[in-house]
Image (cartoon, helix red, strand yellow):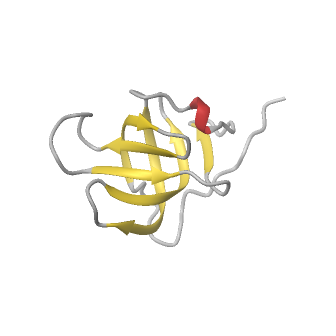
């Protein structure tokens, strides 16, 4: 049975995602998302750490896992609000919606 989740995409910081972009790299507990293109212009990349509290769904709300996210895929990510200003920027994902 597929678990559907109602996701409230409004967090304390914004109803808009922190970033919409392509997944350039995926590790055991993080993804690197590029606002531009992978390997392209500098700037706009954010590495998001994925925790047990991170909600991952597809566009219609079906619950997914980190394994469902593919390098080269497109995602919308809402962060927890705290982003380290390193390169790439780093933060924790609150919600990830897999677009493709």
> In the figure, is residue 7 to the left or right of 90?
right
Q: Nearer the viewer, residue 51 or 81?
A: 51
Q: Name the residue at the front extreme.
A: 28
Residue sitting nearer the eye, 8 or 20: 20
Name the residue rendered at 56%, 52% in the picture.
95
Residue 4 in which image quadrant: top right
| Spot occupied by residue 53 in the image (x, y as percentages of width and height) | 66, 57
Number of marks drawn: 0
The relative height of residue 84 versus residue 56 in the rendered view (above or below) is below
Q: Position of residue 40 (x, y in %)?
A: 18, 35
Judged from this view, the residue extending furthest toward the right is 1
Please indicate whether residue 28 sits to the left or right of residue 53 in the image.
left
Tell me: 36 left or right of 20: left
Image coords of residue 51 (percent x, y): 61, 54
Residue at 29% over, 66% down = 85
40 relative to 76, above or below: above
User: Residue visible at 62% across and 36% down?
Assistant: 60
Place of residue 26 in the rendered image (x, y in percent of width and height, measured from the top left)? 46, 37
Q: Looking at the rendering, in which quadrant would you find the N terminus?
A: top right
């Amino acid at each position: 049975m597929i678990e559907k989740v109602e996701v409230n995409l409004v967090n304390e910081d914004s109803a808009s995602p922190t970033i919409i972009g392509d997944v350039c790299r995926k590790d055991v507990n993080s993804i690197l998302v590029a606002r531009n293109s992978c390997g392209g212009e500098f700037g706009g990349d954010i590495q998001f750490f994925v925790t047990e509290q991170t909600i991952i769904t597809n566009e219609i709300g079906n619950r997914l896992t980190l394994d469902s996210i593919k390098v080269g895929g497109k995602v919308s990510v809402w962060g927890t609000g705290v982003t380290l200003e390193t390169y790439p920027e780093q933060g924790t994902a609150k919600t990830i919606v897999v677009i493709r």
